[in-house]
Image (cartoon, rainbow, N blue to C red):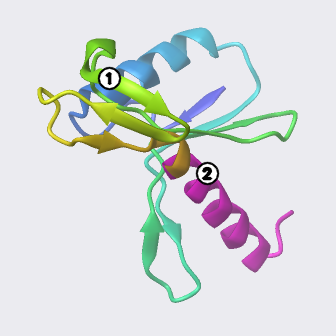
Amino acid sequence: MKFHPEHPFDSNKGENVVWSALRTALHKEKGDAFYRVPLIGRDGFIRYEPDIILFPEDGLSLILECKGFRIEHIVSIRGAMWQMSEEWFRRQERPVSQARDQALAMREQFEGQGIE
């Protein structure tokens, strides 16, 4: 798989660990991986920036939302809402909802450019 860029351009530890692991695991696969690609809304403004998008050659895309917390920071999971411990800087996380919203925005952007 081709990685764009080859190395992350920031110091986000959670994303960088996942990026490095994907490069190791997927180096023989065909396709493309993108790091922090801005998704533009119809109004021309950046609406989302998925952490990682994978485009394997088979055409099924995958959006990964990376979080830098540890498992012990999760108090409970109720559907798409994750209740976090006081040690984490935010009381709730919604990574599943984030990824879903990003996927819908990506589809909308592709459809707007005539890509199916």
Instruction: Say which quarter of the image contains residue 68.
Output: top left
Picture coordinates of residue 97 (x, y %)?
53, 49
- Residue carrying label 2: 100
Label 2 secondary element: helix
- Residue carrying label 1: 74
Say which amino acid is labelled 2: Arg
Q: Residue at x 64, y 54 (%)?
A: 103
| Vertical placement of residue 114 versus 1, above or below | below
Quadrant location of the N terminus?
Answer: top right
Picture coordinates of residue 44 (x, y %)?
49, 85
Q: Residue at x 31, y 23 (%)?
A: 75
State the predominant SS element of the stretch in magenta: helix
Residue found at the very far bottom of the displayed protein: 43
Please rate how many residues cluster around mark 2, counting C-alpha atoms within 10 Å: few if below 14, some from 14 to 19, many from 20.
some
Picture coordinates of residue 65 (x, y %)?
47, 38
**Residue 96, magenta (yes or no):** no
Instruction: Say which quarter of the image contains residue 102.
Output: bottom right
- Which residue is more in the foreground, 16 or 91? 91
Q: Residue at x 86, y 63 (%)?
A: 116
Left or right placement of residue 112 versus residue 33 in this view: right
Say which amino acid is labelled 1: Ile
Q: Residue at x 43, y 48 (%)?
A: 36
**Mark 2 → mark 1, Cα distance in angstroms:** 20 Å
| Vertical placement of residue 62 versus 106, above or below | above
Q: What segment carries the magenta color?
A: 98-116
Please rate how many residues cluster around mark 1, counting C-alpha atoms within 10 Å: few if below 14, some from 14 to 19, many from 20.
some
Label 1 secondary element: strand
Instruction: Say which quarter of the image contains residue 12.
Output: top left
- CB-based contact (under 8 Å), mark 2 and mark 1: no
| Vertical placement of residue 5 versus 26, above or below | below
